[in-house]
Image (tube, rainbow, N blue to C red):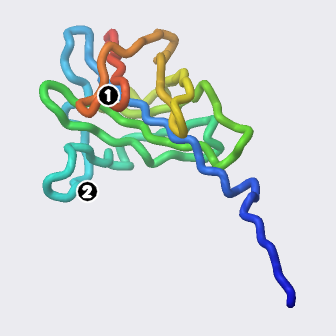
Amino acid sequence: MFFIVLSCGKKDSYPPYYYTLQIRFTDQFGNDKVQGIKYIEDNKPGSSDEYKVQKDIYRLEVEQTHKPKEDLLRVQKVEPYNYLIIRTSTLPSPDYRPKHLAHRLVCAHVFGDEEEHTIVSDWEKVGSSDKCISITVDGKTFTSTENDQYGNFPIFLVSLDE
């Protein structure tokens, strides 16, 4: 009799680490800069008011995820304001869990220009996910003052001076 023992303990069998960043953008007068952004109606009836932002109106790269381009920009439409959601993950690895992510975002609808804007997010470990504790947008640091409507993730309020 012959038995073969297989192991699933391969390095690539580790789950990725997930990051969810939620940002509300306003102008200097408190007006919602995300309001009216073009999105794709991809939700089923009765699901949340979260939609994919149209790919042709933005460019997003997240450096530490080792992915060349992210297509994970979404908009959450809630009253009285909307916010952007950036969801990303690292490649599966037991040794790589970044505490800082550098997001390079071009979105004229939000920023009013075609320039690349840098968002650096700082994270702490919470189980298999990570929680954002602060962000820096073009050199200005912001902390969260509220969570999303489900209480899961912080929302950052970024006031864009024009």
Numbered tag placed on residue 125 in the rendering: none
Question: Visible in this render: residue 111?
Answer: no
Q: Quadrant of the N terminus?
A: bottom right
Provide residue 127's location: percent of width, then percent of height: 53, 35
Q: Amino acid at mark 2?
A: Asp
Occupied quadrant, residue 100 = top right
Disc 2 crowd rating (10 Å Cα; few below 14, some 14-19, many 20+) is few
* Left or right of 65, for residue 145: left
Q: Quadrant of the C terminus?
A: top left
The residue at 48%/27% (across/down) is: 131
Is label 1 or label 2 in front?
A: 2
Residue lying farthest to the right in this orientation:
2
Q: Amino acid at mark 1?
A: Val
Numbered tag placed on residue 110 in the rendering: 1
Disc 1 crowd rating (10 Å Cα; few below 14, some 14-19, many 20+) is many
Residue lying farthest to the front in this orientation:
1
Provide residue 29's location: percent of width, then percent of height: 20, 9
Residue matched to label 2: 42
Provide residue 56's location: percent of width, then percent of height: 37, 48
Which is more N-terminal, label 2 or label 1?
A: 2
Mark 1 and mark 2: Cα distance apart in space = 21 Å
38 relative to 146, above or below: below
Element type at mark 1? helix
